[in-house]
Image: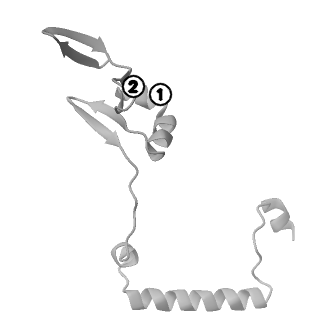
Amino acid sequence: MAEFEVATNGVSLVLPVTHIRLNKDAMTTLSPTAARANLTRWLKRAAGGEDIGILCGGQVIALRPVKIYSEDYAQREYGVTGAELNAFVKRTDAEIKRERKAGRLRRYTGNLDATLRD
């Protein structure tokens, strides 16, 4: 079990760490074991804006949401240029339109059994 050292007025205490909250405005700090036991809960709270940290050695690693946005994703992931991606989108949209018009493409309603029966 991880330990947390508190030093106040020349007195040093070593406490087991499961879930530390120093004050209501501070970061909630967890041991890896405590974080793992309820990881989804802690991730949801961090995604909601609460400061959550996990102890790792002598450091606190903060959980924070990260917005991911990349204009060059297709180029980096698939090696295509913007023009090639636009051409692909245009061809795919036209193919979908043709398949719908011909009756070969149906909208999925969420019921796989019913869709496969039809």
Q: Where is residue 14 in the image (x, y as percent from the top left)?
A: 24, 11
Position of residue 52 in the picture relative to residue 3 (left or right): right
Locate the C terminus and report the quarter of the image it occupies.
bottom right
Q: Where is residue 79 in the image (x, y as percent from the top left)?
A: 35, 80
What residue do we see at 48% from left, 39% from top?
Answer: 45
Q: Residues within 10 Å of mark 1 (few under 14, many from 20)?
A: few
| Of residues 91 and 22, the one drawn nearer to the viewer in this rendering | 22
Which residue reaches farthest top? 11
| Colour pattern of the rendering | one colour
What residue do we see at 27% from left, 17% from top?
Answer: 3
Position of residue 104 in the picture relative to residue 59 (left or right): right
The answer to whether marks 2 and 1 mark residues whose Cβ atoms lie closer than 8 Å is yes
Please name the residue that numbered disc 2 is placed on: 33
Position of residue 55 in the picture relative to residue 10 (left or right): right
Please name the residue that numbered disc 1 is placed on: 37
| Of residues 16 and 21, the one drawn nearer to the viewer in this rendering | 21
Q: Quadrant of residue 77?
A: bottom left
Q: Where is residue 91 in the image (x, y as percent from the top left)?
A: 56, 91
The amino acid sitting under disc 2 is Thr
The amino acid sitting under disc 1 is Ala
Local SS, label 2: helix
> Disc 2 versus disc 1: distance between alpha carbons?
6 Å
Rendered view: 85 above or below 23: below
Total numbered circles: 2
Q: Position of residue 29 (x, y in %)?
A: 35, 29
| Of residues 94 and 5, the one drawn nearer to the viewer in this rendering | 5
